[in-house]
Image: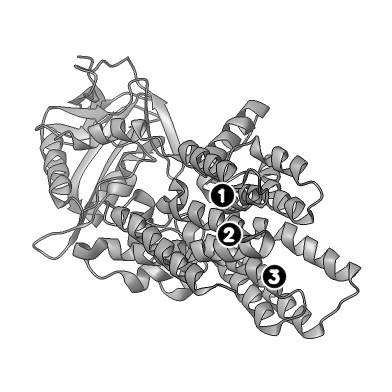
Amino acid sequence: MLTKQEKLWLCLLLTAAAAVRGFLIFRDLEYDEIWSLENYAALPLSKIFSDLSTPNNHPVNTLLIKFLWFSKEFFWSIRIGSLLFSTASVALLWLIGRKLFSRSAAWYAAVAGAFLPPLIVSGTTARGYAGEMFYLLLFHLALLNCRKGSIKWCITAAISALFAIISLPTAVLYMVPTAGFYLLYFWKKRRFFPLQTAIFSTAALLAGFWFIINFNSFIQQKQFKASFTSFEGFYSWLNSAFSENGIWMWILPLIIIIFRKRKIIWVLAAMFLFPLLAALVTSPAPARVYLPSAAVGILLCASFSTIKKWRYGMSAALLLMQTAVSYPERSEEKTVQKIYNLSAPDGHIKIYPPAAGYPLRWNHPETVEKFFLSLISASQKDICFLALPEKENISGFAMDGSVISAPLPFKLTASDKDAPYLLALKKSSIIPPDTLAFAIYPPMPQENLTALFQDLAPKTTLFFNQWFRVPLKAPDGKIHKYMIFAFTLDRERRFPAGYPYYLPLEK
C-alpha cells in the first residue's frame, strides 16, 4: 500500500508527532490524572472494570497507569500509553484517509493528527481519550477492510470496538452510524457471512452485558454531566465542544454540499452529528469527551484534498484555521495558577476551586508541606484567614461529592488584583443556628476526627479542598487526617474553649 518513499515520510512524521508530544509529557500531572492514580490504579481488576460512578476511571487507561507507574520521580511514565496511542493514531488517519479519498487526503489527515493541539494534549495526558480515539480509528479501518468478509479484519474490528468502549463508554456513539451503514450495505448487497456475524454479535453482547451490570454506576455519573434549559445553553456547550476539539460549525454543511454525491461524506457527517444530537436529548458529557469528533472533522476536511485545482492552498488554509481555532486558551488557568503559587502566610489557609487541579505531593512536596503547616497554624489561632478564589460565594463539595456553593455574609475585597480574597475567621465557642460557620480540623487520628464530626452533627456541610486531603502517618504509626469545611446547625450550640470552630469576621 505504501511506497518506500511514503514509508520514510510517514516515519519522519510519526517521529515529529512523538517529539512534539514529548515536550509536554513532563509537565505536572493534572487533577484527573492524580485522581485516577491515587484512587483507581491500585484497585483489583474487578473493581477497575466496575467502579465507574465517577468519570475519573477510564478502565483501559487505569490499567496502563497500574503497569506504567514507577515512582514519584518518574510520574510522567503513566502518560506513555497515551503518547503511543496518539502517535499510532496519526498512522491510522493516513491509512483511513487513503482508503476513503486519496494520498493527498491521507497526508492532510496525518499532518492534522500529528499537530492539532487537542490531539497533542490528549496524547500527553494519562486519560482514556487517546486510547479511545486509537481503537475507534482501528475499528473503522477494520470495517473498511472487511466488506468482503475478511475474518482477520472482522476480529480486529470486534476487538477494537470492545477496547474503545472500555476506554470510554461514549465511544459507542461513534459506532452507531457506521454500524447502521454497514448493515444497510450488506443488506443491499444481499451478503450474509455467518461466522463474521457471530463475531460481531459476540462483541456486541459482551459490550451490552458490561453496560447492563454497571448500569447503576453509569447512572451516578449524571451528576457530572450538563443539562440544558434553553437553546442558548446547548449552543454554548456545542461551541465549547467544537472549539476544544478543533472543529467548527460552518465547515460541515459546506463539505456536504460540495461532495453531496459521495456516500462516504454522508457517513462521516452522520458520525459527526449523531453524538452531538444525542447530547441534545440526553445529559451531555463535558466537551473533551467528544474528542473523536476531531478525527471525523479531520477526515471531512481531508476530502478537500481531492479537488486538484485547490488541493494545496485549501488544505493549508484549513489546517492553519483548524490549528488556530483549537489552540487552547490559557488566561483563566494563569489566574488560577497565581492563586496556587501564593505562599500562605502564617494563619492563612488557601481554598482551592472545586474543579481545579491541585499541586501533587510528589510534584510539589514543598507546597503540600507548607499547606499542612498553615493548616496547623491557623487552627491554633484566635483569628485566621481563608484565601478564596472568589468574592461572592464560597464553593466546595457536598457529602455526595457534587459541587455546591454558599453565599458569604458580606462582600470581600482584595488588596491588589493578583491577591486572593481574604475571609477573616474568629474562633467562637457559640455557633448560632442557620449561620454559616467554619471548622478547621488539623491532622489528627482518624477516630478523633470522626468523633468530632459526629458530635458536631451539622445540618448542612460544605467541604473544601476535598481532593487535596493527604493522609499523614504519625510517629506512633497511626494515620492522621484533616478536614476543612463550612457548616450550619439547626440549633445554637456551645463548645468548650479551644474547639476549632469559627465565625466570619468582617475586616
Q: Is residue 437 left or right of residue 303?
A: left
What's the residue type where badge 1 is placed? Ala
Structural distance between the alpha carbons of marks 3 and 2 = 18 Å
Q: Nearer the viewer, mark 1 or mark 2?
A: 2
**Which residue position is annotated with label 1?**
294
Query: Counting residues from the N terminus, which is met first, the one under dot 3 or under dot 2?
Result: 2
Q: Secondary structure at mark 2?
A: helix
Within 10 Å of the Cα at label 3, are there few (<14), some (14-19), or many (20+) other Cα atoms?
Answer: many
* Residue 24 is at least partly visible in this image: yes
**Label placed on residue 106:** 2
Q: Earlier in the sequence, mark 3 or mark 1?
A: 3
Is 201 situated above or below 261? below
Q: Secondary structure at mark 3?
A: helix
Residue 317 in percent (x, y) is at 54, 39
Figure quadrant of the N terminus: bottom right
- Pick the residue in front: 456 or 40: 40
Question: Residue 20's spot in the image, x, y percent?
Answer: 35, 55
Give the residue at mark 3.
143
Would you identify the image quadrant in which residue 195 lies? bottom right
Placement of 132 over or under 201, stated as above or below: above
Q: Amino acid at mark 2?
A: Ala
Residue visible at 33% across and 64% down? 78
